[in-house]
Image (cartoon, rainbow, N blue to C red):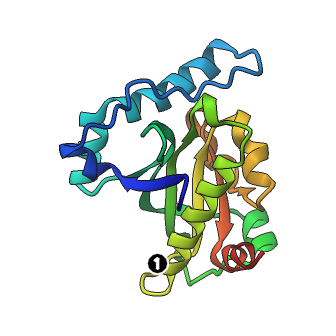
Amino acid sequence: MGKYRLLNILELRNGNIDISNFNCIPSNTEHTQKELNDFEMINDFVKNKDKALKYAENNIYKTFLLLDNQNDKVMGFYSLCTGSKVFYKRFKAEKGVPTIGRNKALPTIDIMWLAVDVHYQEKNIGSMLLKKICASVYDTSKTIGVCVLTVDSLFQSQKFYEKFGFMDLGSPHKKNEDLWLGLTIPEIEVFLRN
């Protein structure tokens, strides 16, 4: 990777990489209190190394850090887990998601966290991390059943995901102001070819 490297957070157990300064709050816009709280929740997850490590050790989320090779700063990170989601008519029709009998929920891989440190924003790091996630999900889909890559997105990040083809799963996923977006495995295959 040259200028940077991807590191499984489990490798931090014995390492001396400092993640306490990670901050994903964009400095180029004003934020509501709710938006600030959302960003702080993301910061707290990765800065609380014990929590992130515990999630990884217990196979709840697998978290990967993108490190700057020049200074070992965390440029960004993402956390993945498996899940199942119910997809609603518009999403299924537009994305060609299969319907199998009465089974409404289909297998997914979920992006639970994806964030870029403020010092590395606007440098395509988020796009690069998303491409790495898509490659991993696509490889997984060859050996494990998965229909859609989903993301529990902040509303302010929706346009970022939509630019790659992600689409809102439907209103039932908006409980507690969650915004679940999805990208199908065939769409991921096309994305990776470009």
Q: Residue at x 38, y 54 (%)?
A: 7
Residue matched to label 1: 140
Which residue sits at x=47%, y=28%?
Answer: 22
Amino acid type shown at disc 1 = Thr
Q: Position of residue 71 (x, y in %)?
A: 45, 37
Determine which quarter of the picture holds residue 45: top left
Q: Is residue 130 left or right of residue 94?
A: left
Extreme-left residue of the structure: 14
Q: Please, what secondary structure does the residue beneath circle 1 have?
A: helix
Give left or right: position of 16 versus 85: left
Q: Quadrant of residue 27?
A: top right
Q: Give percent across and percent down for residue 19.
A: 38, 32
**Position in image of residue 183 (x %, y %):** 67, 65
Q: How many marks?
A: 1
Pick the front one: 185 or 90: 185
- In the picture provided, is 46 more to the left or to the right than 148? left
Q: Residue at x 73, y 43 (%)?
A: 158
Residue at point 52%, 71% (across, down)? 137
The residue furthest front is 70
Residue 129 vertical position relative to residue 138 in the rendered view, above or below: above
Classed neighbour count for the residue bearing mark 1: other residues with Cα under 10 Å, few (<14), some (14–19), many (≥20): few
Q: Position of residue 37 (x, y in %)?
A: 54, 19
Where's the C terminus, which quadrant? bottom right
Q: Residue furthest bottom?
A: 142
